[in-house]
Amino acid sequence: MTDVLRVTGLTKTYGGRRGTVTVRALDGLSMTVEKGEFVGIMGPSGSGKTTLLHLLGTIDRPTSGHIILEGQELSDLKGLDLAVFRRRRLGFIFQEFNLLDSLTIKENIILPLALEKKPASEIESRTAELARELGILEVLSRYPYEVSGGQKQRAAAARALMAAPALVLADEPTGNLDTAAARSLMGCLEDLNVRKEATILMVTHDPVSASYCRRILFIKDGRIHAELRRGLDRGQFLQRILDTIAVSGGGCRDLATSGR
Amino acid sequence: MTWRHLAVRNIRHRAGTYTSFFLSSTLAVAMFFLYAAGVDHPAFSGNSGMGAVRTALGAVEVLVAVFAILFIGYAHGAFLKARQRELAVLNLIGLTPAQLGKMIHWENAIIGGASLAVGLGSGLTLARLFFLAMGKALDLDVPVSFYWPVRAMAVTAATFTLIFGLLSWRGYRRLSRWPVAELLRGAARGNKPPRVSAWLAMACFLTLGSSYVLVLWPGPRPALLRDMMQSGAYTWAVLALLAVGTYLFFSEAGGAVLAAFKVRPAVYYRGANLITVSQLLYRARDNVKILFMVSLLSTMAFTAVGWFTRTYQVVEKRAIEETPVGVQMMGMPGGLSPERVEAILSEHGLPAGAHAQFRVLRAKIAAQANAYVYLMPLSEVNRWIGTLTAAKELTVGPGQATLLVSPAYPWNPMLGAWNLDLGQGPLAVIVTGRVVTGGIFARWLGISGQVVMEDSVFERLWQTYGATRGLVANGWDLPAWRSRAAREAAGQLVIEGQATRFSQGPETVYSRPIAYSNLKAGAGMALVLAGFLSVLFFLASGSMIYFKLYTDVQEERSQFQTMIKLGLDVSEIRQVVSVQTAILFFTPVVFAVVHGTLALAAMTGDTGRSLWLPAGLTGAVFAFLYIGYFLATRGSYVRAVMEG
């Protein structure tokens, strides 16, 4: 197995100018993700999960440390190169879906390939394939406000996978979904991970959603605090996740209460 | 806390949203007021030659009011939309509809009152500056002075109090009718792209087509069209057809073009095209409204300037038509003598030009009071034409009498027997023809017609009536008729002529310098007004686009943020913004030039080259100003998007 992502000594501090308090969101964090992995990131509020995701997604820049995605050092990228890298190598799934209101579901999905100016026939066949996989074929011609939250998030997932990126970053993808929709989405992501070998890194609060991952990293105070690997049985995995959360104790209360 | 307090707090808290609405309202107030003040200016109302123009200006005032309603209504709609969520929350925490209404009414009263005050204040200041500048620039004899436009202020205050009242009521109705859930969803509510209808497309084709046909009619126009042209219904019909056609064009042709994009994946799926086209479609309804309003405004501005440029351009030609001879005078017993006229001219340093004269019999038309006809001998008239003008000599066959008609005042009286009265019983003169000529004086006041007859016939009449009804017309060439000296000499001639003229007789002296200076002053005033209007309309339409985009930015910032996260580069975002902004700015200019030229042709009944200069010039100035406005707007739009 080859590493898709290699993070070493990643630190991010906020503030610190003119007497404001310095906040250290990430503190020398290191991790790797292999090709075809489905990794979950868990941790209490303020542990640095979102900061990590922003840094990996090139939306923010680290104070120090290295992020190497498929051999490319991210901090070397600027301007147009950064934009192009983002749309070719990364896929995003957000908690708020972030579909464009003015585009139909289908148009939202094809946007990354359209920006790459790929031939229309290739775009069409890829869209059809992913839409079938994610079960949103029948809503392709609708606008985002006409479909359910679960459908929106599955469309966002299709969009994230459209350009066959090296890494899909998912930020609380089930945070705005009801239980059934959340399960169906996680099932889809698991499928895509297994069948299309999509490499996925997902931040979540929800132990049930996390139990679909292959491996889970727990973050606390800006560092990796624990790691769990899933065996064959998802039910058992869920129980181990809940145990880990319970052991982590103080500051993790918000995790336990959100369990489904 | 009273409802007034809550309203004041709201306004303070969401300054951006309110500022946008406040500024658009202020702009509309200032624009309406400036227009009304311009139309009311004494310099225009005092000028007799402006009667027809004033009627048109009054009609345009109504149009400006309609436009203000549309504009403020649009801004108010966007304003409400931006605040839906907030109002829904108030609704949820238990505000009764009556309380909500009170709050909305207070807000509207505060904003409306403020924009009325600021609009009137800035309007007054601008008007003052504007009149000063234009008076200086045009070097008018009568400066365009500042005055207190009381009527304009009153009309503006009344109109806008009404508008704000109506808006307040509409806002309340809309908010109290929509379900709270709908309000909570706010701006994300769907905006389905409109469907293109074959019927409306056909209507668009018909309206635009028929207006073009009406104006560009090949060959002689049928009788119905000629009648319409005389009554002015023609111009209005063309304008109405153009307006309806333009609206349909934007909604139908625009929709069809975008739809055509959608079914061609090879183009549609290419880069930022996808976003550009789908955003245009998504905002189609708003876009059509704005495009239509801006096109209408631009066309009005274009037409006004074009029309008055053309009028100014033809002032000299018109002066020559009205007064083919530099100075003309009817010599009558006890009147000004030709020697005195020449003396006055040389006193002013004007060389004595060629001189000619002919005899005239002044006959009353029997059946009418105070209507007179001049009878004139052919050979003497031709000598006058040959000496003093560049016109063709006249021919009158034996036994014929021909009515002379000036190109400046074409009319078409009945030919045949005219019953005249020369003081000794009735006399019938058979008028056998009509000829348009620029060779004889255009008019003597109080004269209904000028009839040229064979010398032998005239001699016979002269022998009988010459002693009692005979007069002598004198004319002098005046090459320096544009000069100040000529104007002063002409002024003195008029004064001395009036002092000696008959109590009820015709004016004795008529001169080109006076006609020229009057026409120039009138046309100059009109040009001032047109320039004023078009600057106003230009500012208004540019600002409208700016406000529309500003409102859009508020809604779209998050959308653009998403695009950036997905890997859209700044240059691609600029491309998306540029195309949309450019369409809003430049489509109306194209329409203004095409339709404005057409409207000019309809107003002047002229489709020839004489329109090229005013149309081209105005169009160029417009395009130039719009490019500046476009660049500034696009720049601030992109900045606003990237800000978040």
Image (cartoon, rainbow, N blue to C red):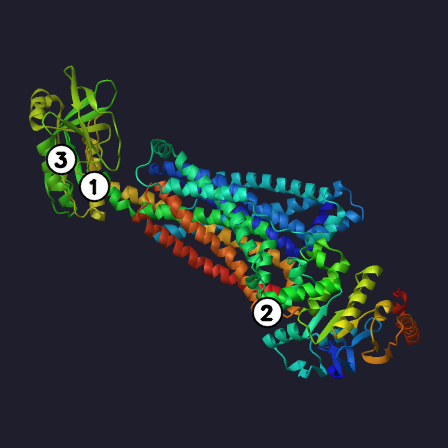
Q: Tell me where residue B240 appears, x and y as whole percent.
A: 46, 39
Q: Which mark is residue A259?
A: none
Circles 3 and 1: CB atoms closer than 8 Å = no
Circle 3: element type: loop
Q: Secondary structure at mark 1?
A: helix
- Tell me which chain the residue with mark 3 is part of: B
Q: Tell me the quadrant of the picture where the C terminus of chain B can be found.
A: bottom right
The percent position of residue B412, horizontal first and vertical second, equals 26, 29
Marks 2 and 3 on same chain: no
Task: Tell me the amino acid under the disc marked 3.
Answer: Leu
Instruction: Please tell me whether residue A129 is drawn above or below residue B171 in the rendered image.
Output: below
Type of amino acid at the residue the image marks with label 1: Ala
Which residue corresponds to the image point at 59% horizontal and 54% vertical from the top-left?
B281
Give me the disc on residue B490.
1
- Residue B392 visible in this rendered orientation of the protein: yes
The one nearer the camera, A104 or B18, is A104
